[in-house]
Image: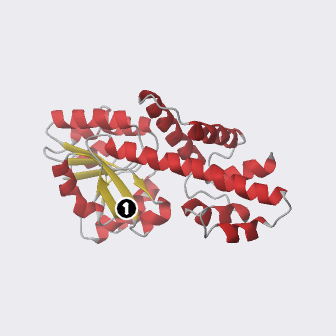
Amino acid sequence: MGRSMAGHLQKAGHKLHVYNRTKEKAAALVEAGATWHETAGSAAAEADVVFTIVGFPTDVEATYLGQGGVVERAKPGALLIDMTTSSPALAVRIADAAKKRGLSSLDAPVSGGDLGAKEARLVIMVGGDATAFARAKPLFELMGKNIALHGGPGAGQYCKMANQIAVAVAMVAWCEALVYAKKAGLDPTAVHASISGGAAGGWAMTNLAPRALSENFAPGFYVKHILKDMRIALESAAELKIDLPGLACAKKLYDQVAARGWEDCGTQALYRLYISL
């Protein structure tokens, strides 16, 4: 996703300074004129606006708050934008650390997956200062279509958690519907064609169920990443003193998917679990 998103900025004429833990993944950007750096902090030291999208909250924390990291090395007045799906509390910590150094920061997780990144139609959910958001919006518009500021630091992550709660529970719904149809002796592909355009329809039903029915479990979005998101959402829900039984059920099922060695599959591998039980 990061390579596609950076590519849109580059095509719009912005000078890029790039870093990736796997250098080969940035090769196309470098060949097109981006400057390669050996660390995220080194790249940040040259940039007016810093974008990051990594894997897990621990990666975000190390990238921003670690020794020689983005907050320590960024130029005075720089705008820091983390687009990883991460912890709301960590987003607040980064914002506080950035402010102490005279920097601006936004948490801006995205939805839309690899295809949305390639086609520049991501949903971008933002938390932070309104002035920083206004500064970032023309850049966001090169990567996404549905862009909104939801509040102060951490608000983007809270919105993304709401998104992921809906996604996780919806995955359980279509898997149960289609395995029920299969066990009843129906053709699940035909059932999918009948129900996906009605009240039961949705993005996952339309896009992921057909992949599962054709036994295509290649990742658009990894099982290990939806598990990470569900852990964050459940931890956050506990802090908010609310119970999310649907999400807890989805998490338990995806734990079983991962236990079978499928954590690097796409999230539609949940259907694989159902038909194997």
Q: Position of residue 8 (x, y in %)?
A: 34, 67
Q: Quadrant of residue 39?
A: top left
**Is the C terminus in the top left, top right, bottom left or bottom right quadrant?**
top right
**Mark 1 — residue?**
5
Q: Residue furthest right?
A: 185
- Residue 54 can be seen in this image: no
The residue located at (13%, 43%) in the rendering is: 76
The residue located at (32%, 40%) in the rendering is: 154
- Residue 234 can be seen in this image: yes
The residue located at (41%, 65%) in the rendering is: 28
Q: Position of residue 260 (x, y in %)?
A: 72, 42
The residue located at (53%, 45%) in the rendering is: 225
The kind of residue tagged 1 is: Met
Q: Position of residue 162 (x, y in %)?
A: 45, 46
User: Dot 1: what SS?
Assistant: helix
Give neighbour class at mark 1: few <14, some 14-19, many 20+ (Cα, 10 Å). many
On screen, 79 above or below 115?
above
Q: Position of residue 179 (x, y in %)?
A: 76, 55
As rendered, which of 53 and 175 lies closer to the eye? 175
On screen, 47 above or below 138?
above
Relative to 68, 194 lies left or right:
right
